[in-house]
Image (spheres, rainbow, N blue to C red):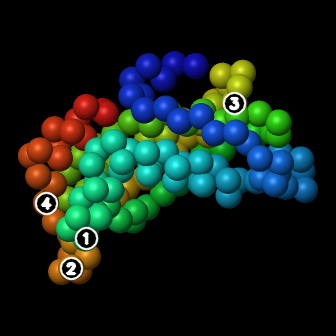
């Protein structure tokens, strides 16, 4: 498992209810795991607080996941996350999902825009927020 450049990690327990008829974790749960990692990034970057205080925050506009290997119950999934890019008002996250053996089970990408929910439009990423985000590249 070579994900040393992925600054964030989140370990989640796989629940029995996440399995499908094939006795492995249903693919939709990979997206939920990535969502948990995405929210973790929003929290550490201050984007969650920005939304709470000013109704400005990230809005997911694209997500995808490539499935590499199944996940099983019982077990855990480790989601490693990093910032893939930062543009004017958008940014991307890359995720790698691993099982307890360190096998790569999924690779995902998210794109989010910084959105002002008061004015119903995107806003530019401030220099301060950009510097925080860069810490996770």
What residue is drawn where x is 48% and y is 23%? 3
Quarter the C terminus occupies? top left
Picture coordinates of residue 82, whole percent (x, y) = 39, 36
Picture coordinates of residue 2, whole percent (x, y) = 51, 19
Q: CA distance from mark 1 to mark 4?
A: 14 Å
Q: Earlier in the sequence, mark 3 or mark 2?
A: 3
| Tag 3 residue | 99
Q: Quadrant of residue 83?
A: top left
What residue is drawn where x is 53% and y is 36%? 10
| Tag 1 residue | 55
Q: Secondary structure at mark 4?
A: loop
| Tag 2 residue | 118
Q: Earlier in the sequence, mark 2 or mark 1?
A: 1
Q: CA distance from mark 3 to mark 1?
A: 36 Å
- Count neighbours of disc 3 (C-alpha within 10 A) and say few if under 14, some if 14 to 19, many if 20 or more: many
Q: Secondary structure at mark 1?
A: loop
| Tag 4 residue | 124
- Mark yes or no: residue 23 visible: yes
Is residue 27 found left or right of 124 in the rendered image? right
Q: Is residue 19 above or below residue 106?
A: below
Q: Comparing marks 3 and 2, which lies closer to the viewer?
A: 2
Is residue 80 found left or right of 129 in the rendered image? right
For this orientation, the residue located farthest to the left is 127
Q: Secondary structure at mark 3?
A: loop
Cβ atoms at labels 1 and 4 below 8 Å apart: no
Q: Which residue is at the front of the view, 129 or 122?
A: 129
Cβ atoms at labels 2 and 1 below 8 Å apart: yes
Q: Comparing marks 3 and 1, which lies closer to the viewer?
A: 1
Q: Earlier in the sequence, mark 1 or mark 4?
A: 1
């Amino acid at each position: 498992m070579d994900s040393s450049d992925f600054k964030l990690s989140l370990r989640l327990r796989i629940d029995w209810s996440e399995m499908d008829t094939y006795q492995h974790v249903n693919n939709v749960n990979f997206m939920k795991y990535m969502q948990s990692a995405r929210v973790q990034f929003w929290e550490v970057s201050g984007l969650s607080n920005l939304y709470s205080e000013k109704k400005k925050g990230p809005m997911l506009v694209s997500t995808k996941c490539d499935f590499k290997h199944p996940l099983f119950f019982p077990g855990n999934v480790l989601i490693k996350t990093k910032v893939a890019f930062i543009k004017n008002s958008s940014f991307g996250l890359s995720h790698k999902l691993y099982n307890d053996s360190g096998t790569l089970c999924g690779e995902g990408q998210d794109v989010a825009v910084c959105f002002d929910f008061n004015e119903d439009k995107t806003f530019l990423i401030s220099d301060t927020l950009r510097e925080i985000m860069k810490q996770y590249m």
